[in-house]
Image (tube, rainbow, N blue to C red):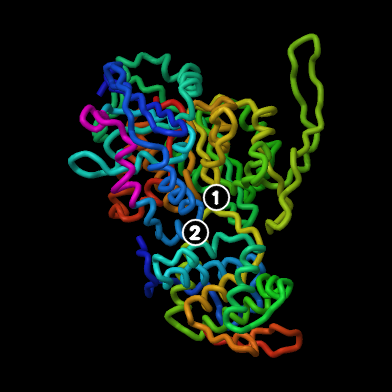
């Protein structure tokens, strides 16, 4: 029986080098795993963290817009919505996660546990939920140019540090 | 132990806007009205628990503090005083309103501080009327219960036990194509039954698992139906929720009507389109609750639903929980085994095999077999993962 924490017995079910080959449903699963792991590192009493995974896309993108604005990054509602459902942005986030081996291993373990469930994975890729969490957790720097280069305007090169 | 000597009690809840009550009927038939507390006291906790158990990622990772709080702290306040002291062998729990789908069987109680479902056999029914209907059509109740004996330790073979013989089972994974894994549950259960007329449908063996085949399989009146498939919950209309099966090519259904009408045919089409946005490995369709209630003949002694979202749902008008498990009971099943939340596949499979060891090999009634299965899985897992050992519940008749 496996315990709650990531351990060495976790099989490598995610090829972090070939993330861009993941189909949408697997990518969605991986993003959901990142959200879950990041929520764990949040303050237990912070109710705003708790609700992120359960929020529908509309309110989530508005929340993202607000949080970005608080950090001096002005994005329109449609831009926030685009970030929310953006596959390239999700890949970018995951590539950053892959750089942090402990976090990546934990995400992989969460993903593996989730795959054992008899569950339908539907919905959309909510990369914005990850961004929202990392900003709230202060694990990402936001400034007037963007969120360490999050593509708030078209054509901007996207870079991100988690 | 003789089945006729089994002591059965019932807890029937009533919730109104102000208070939560229970009618506790002990094994001697004496009735005790118990005031359990205010509705406002329980409502936020129930809401938080329900929200947690709907979060598949939290359940998958075993991060269920609300469930632990329910088990260890406030859940016992929902059990009537006297239940634990006079603990019967079997308890029929009839929830009401906000109490539907609560895992009462996981509440820790007694001197050993163990989950209720390990101390006694627990079965759930959404109403006493439904329980009475399930019990009244249970052929096992027409057996000589005084002659039906079993040994809970499993050392002595059961005597005069109306053993189930036939199973119709199927498994299909329309999302990932892991049909073999899904079929394995029914195949393993079949080994306990050893009936000659059992039928296991597996897409890998060339047997499609579609709506038409499923309904045709129900019509052979098996003792056990075992379905492993993904479930789909329609957020707006429960009757359009159902099981995700393969797409069938047969669109014409043939029905036999007693004279003078004879045979006639109907267009046997799915009652809803397949939901958009759910990726599948091949064409798929949904066997809906609506179709089951209209066009399925079922009188199985046990239906096993091992699939996501099969055992819970919103409470509809008339205090009817909108779940697939409930639909199968309405359709004619005597008892249903279904998960209360999204289940981990291996844990569910292990629980079912333990259940069949007790029910079929040892001849125990179903509620006691559920107790046996929960204890075995609890012992295997060290009791730390209630979301796994406690996910499956028995509904309907306990015998």
- State which quarter of the image contains the N terminus of chain B: top left
Residue at position x 46%, y 51% from top? B53
Numbered disc 1: secondary structure: helix
Q: Does the rendering let one see residue B366?
A: no
Instruction: Say which of B334 and B142 sits in front.
Output: B334
* Above/below status of A76 relative to B314: below
Residue at which label 1 appears: B182
Question: Is A78 located above or below residue B287 in the figure?
Answer: below
Find the residue positioned furthest to the left. Answer: B111
What residue lies at 44% left-to-right and 51% top-to-bottom? B48
Report whether mark 2 lies on the same chain as mark 1.
no
Residue where numbered disc 2 is placed: A116
Q: Position of residue A33 (x, y in %)?
A: 52, 68
Viewer-nearest of discs 2 and 1: 2
Is the C terminus of chain B in the top left, top right, bottom left or bottom right quadrant? top left
Which residues fall within the magenta stretch?
B69-87
Q: Give coordinates of residue B136: x percent, y percent.
A: 47, 16
């Amino acid at each position: 029986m496996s315990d709650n924490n990531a351990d060495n017995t976790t099989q490598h079910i995610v090829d972090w080098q070939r993330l861009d080959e993941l189909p949408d449903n697997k990518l969605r699963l991986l993003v959901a795993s990142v959200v879950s792991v990041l929520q764990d590192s949040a303050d237990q009493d912070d109710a705003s963290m708790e609700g992120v995974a359960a929020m529908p896309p509309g309110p989530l993108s508005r929340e993202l817009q607000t949080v970005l604005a608080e950090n001096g990054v002005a994005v329109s509602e449609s831009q926030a919505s685009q970030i929310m459902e953006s596959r390239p942005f999700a890949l970018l986030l995951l590539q950053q996660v892959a750089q942090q081996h402990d976090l990546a291993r934990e995400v992989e373990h969460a993903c593996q546990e989730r795959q054992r469930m008899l569950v339908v994975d539907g919905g959309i890729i909510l990369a914005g939920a990850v961004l929202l969490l990392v900003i709230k957790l202060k694990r990402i720097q936001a400034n007037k140019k963007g969120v360490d280069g999050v593509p708030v305007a078209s054509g901007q090169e996207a870079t991100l540090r988690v | 132990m003789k089945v006729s000597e089994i002591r059965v009690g019932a807890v029937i809840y009533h919730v109104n806007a102000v208070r939560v009550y229970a009618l506790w009927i002990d094994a001697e038939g004496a009735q005790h009205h118990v005031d359990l507390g205010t509705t406002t006291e329980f409502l936020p906790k129930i809401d938080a628990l329900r929200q947690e158990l709907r979060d598949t990622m939290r359940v998958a990772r075993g991060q269920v503090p609300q469930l632990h709080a329910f088990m260890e702290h406030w859940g016992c306040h929902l059990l009537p005083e006297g239940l634990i002291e006079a603990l019967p062998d079997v308890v029929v729990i009839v929830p009401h309103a906000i109490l539907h789908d609560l895992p009462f069987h996981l509440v820790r109680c007694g001197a050993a501080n163990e989950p209720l479902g390990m101390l006694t056999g627990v079965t759930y029914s959404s109403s006493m009327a439904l329980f009475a209907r399930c019990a009244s059509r249970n052929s096992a109740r027409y057996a000589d219960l005084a002659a039906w004996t079993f040994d809970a330790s499993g050392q002595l073979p059961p005597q005069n036990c109306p053993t189930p013989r036939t199973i119709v089972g199927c498994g299909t994974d329309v999302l990932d194509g892991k049909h073999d894994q899904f079929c394995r549950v029914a195949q393993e259960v079949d080994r306990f039954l050893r009936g000659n007329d059992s039928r296991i449908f597996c897409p890998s063996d060339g047997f499609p698992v579609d709506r038409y085949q499923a309904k045709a399989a129900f019509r052979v009146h098996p003792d056990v139906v075992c379905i492993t498939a993904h479930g789909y919950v329609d957020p707006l209309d429960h009757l359009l929720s159902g099981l995700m099966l393969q797409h069938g090519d047969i669109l014409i259904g043939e029905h036999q009507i007693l004279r003078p009408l004879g045979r006639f045919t109907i267009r046997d089409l799915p009652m809803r389109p397949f939901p958009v946005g759910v990726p599948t490995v091949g064409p798929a369709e949904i066997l809906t609750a609506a179709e089951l209630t209209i066009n399925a003949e079922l009188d199985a002694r046990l239906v096993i639903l091992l699939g996501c979202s099969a055992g819970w749902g919103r409470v509809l008008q008339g205090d009817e929980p909108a779940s697939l498990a409930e639909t199968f009971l309405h359709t004619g099943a005597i008892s249903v085994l279904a998960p209360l939340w999204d289940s981990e596949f291996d844990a569910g499979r292990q629980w079912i095999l333990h259940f069949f060891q007790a029910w079929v090999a040892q001849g125990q009634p179903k509620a006691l077999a559920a107790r046996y299965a929960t204890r075995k899985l609890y012992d295997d897992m060290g009791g730390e993962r209630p979301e796994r050992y406690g996910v499956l519940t028995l509904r309907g008749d306990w015998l």
